[in-house]
Amino acid sequence: MDPFLPFSAPDHAFTSAAPGYWEKEAVAPHDWNNWAWQMRHRVTSLAGLESRLVLTQAERAGVILSGQKLALAITPHFFNLIHPTDPDCPIRRQVVPRIEESWDNPEEMADPCGEDSHMPVPGLVHRYPDRVLFLVTDRCASYCRYCTRSRVVSGVGEQELHTEWEAAFRYLEQHREIRDVLLSGGDALLLSDKRLESLLQRLRSIPHIEFIRIGSRVPIFLPQRITPALCQMLAQFHPLWMSVHANHPRELTSEVKAALELLANHGIPLGNQSVLLRGVNHDPAVYKILVQKLLRCRVRPYYLYQCDLIKGSSHLRTSVAKGIDIIEHLRGHTSGYAVPQFVIDAPGGGGKVPINPDYLINRDDGHTLIRNYENKIFAYPDPATAPLPFEIAGCRRD
């Protein structure tokens, strides 16, 4: 097999990520397809990178400094997608540290989403009225260099995650307005099947919790983790939803597609939350391939996030105008199912704010002036300005 196939093949193709650079190490298929083997053989050091990649000085310095901010870890599966000599490879930019991570920018924050200030119990974030974020682990299969929780994730940040489990469950039991629990961290799918099942059982025992979500990049970083046994266990707790995280079409390999289809076949609705990243997916043509490829994997593009103001992310952030431009190039030019909502997580804890192109041109007493994806102008007669017959008669309409 040509180890360069993932980057020489067209991005819309579902190429295999295995065995790639590990081919010369003669890994047996039963090892490669074992998620525990993948975790044990993650690239976690400068030596591990240099044995497989030609690093730039900026990358080498970034690796040396990364231990003070966010650990380095890349699964073999995901590592096989990295171009060995191109520092601008869109996969490489997401997981290989760079010196820019150590730069101080006054607008950047350790906790850009204000989670710590909305944490009534350690490990439980209650930022919206009817839903909570439950941080169940501080570890991930691989570490994204733009991680919004780098302060607590990977074990080397400036804070440690100390979730108080029983206090969190009591809080959930006492607050009947909470109907939706999102499991994240870290990555909840790194818990063992048994531990994850116990957690889900406990949440399902709380009557007012209507449904549970899992936010995970494991299906992308570590598709070997998505086993029939895991999916059968998760299917006991419907309605259960999952948000995955793919940023570039090359991440959607044949192994990832099979993992996502296995989840979908067990009744788990799948959505994708991507982050707008310079040099990764800021090109509308690339992003269009990503969302169309996601639909082929039975994943609905859900959110496109403007990159949070996390410390050390300036080299990956791009303008809000670029996100709007991407939506403009999708709306009307591909299936509506393929168009995510572009959002900014308001700095400091203001929550997600939807950002859309300006399709509304003007409103007057009788008409609303709008434009479509072709920039054609239409006038829509607005009935909301005129009273309905029962309103004129002074009648109630229940």
Image: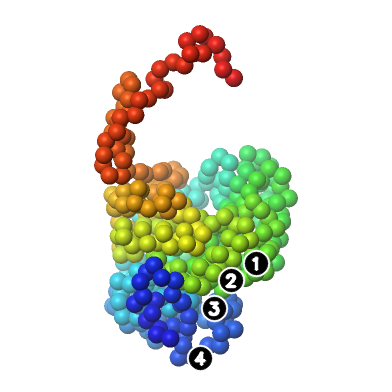
- At x 37% / y 69%, what residue is drawn? 11
Instruction: Specify the label residue 225 is tagged with.
Output: 2
Mark 3 or mark 1: which comes first in sequence? 3
Query: Is 177 rendered above or below residue 253?
Result: above
Instruction: Specify the label residue 26 is tagged with.
Output: 4
Looking at numbered disc 4 in the image, what kind of residue is underneath it?
Ala
Contact, CB < 8 Å: mark 1 with mark 2?
A: yes
Measured in 3D between alpha carbons, the distance from the residue under mark 3 to the one under mark 2, in whole angstroms, is 9 Å
Looking at numbered disc 2 in the image, what kind of residue is underneath it?
Arg
Measured in 3D between alpha carbons, the distance from the residue under mark 3 to the one under mark 1, in whole angstroms, is 17 Å
How was the colour assigned to the protein in this rendering? rainbow
Looking at numbered disc 3 in the image, what kind of residue is underneath it?
Gln
SS at badge 4: loop
Mark 3, residue position:
38
The residue positioned farthest toward the right in the image shown: 205
Mark 3 or mark 2: which comes first in sequence? 3
Mark 2 or mark 4: which comes first in sequence? 4
The spot of residue 394 in percent (x, y) is 52, 9
SS at badge 2: helix
Q: Nearer the viewer, mark 3 or mark 1?
A: 1
Contact, CB < 8 Å: mark 3 with mark 1?
A: no
SS at badge 1: helix
Is 285 situated left or right of 74 in this image? Answer: left
- Front residue (pair 329, 56): 329
Contact, CB < 8 Å: mark 1 with mark 4?
A: no
Q: In which quadrant is the N terminus drawn? A: bottom left
Mark 1 or mark 4: which comes first in sequence? 4
Mark 1, residue position:
230
Is 363 situated left or right of 127 in this image? Answer: left
Query: Is 39 rendered above or below residue 180?
Result: below
Mark 4 or mark 3: which comes first in sequence? 4
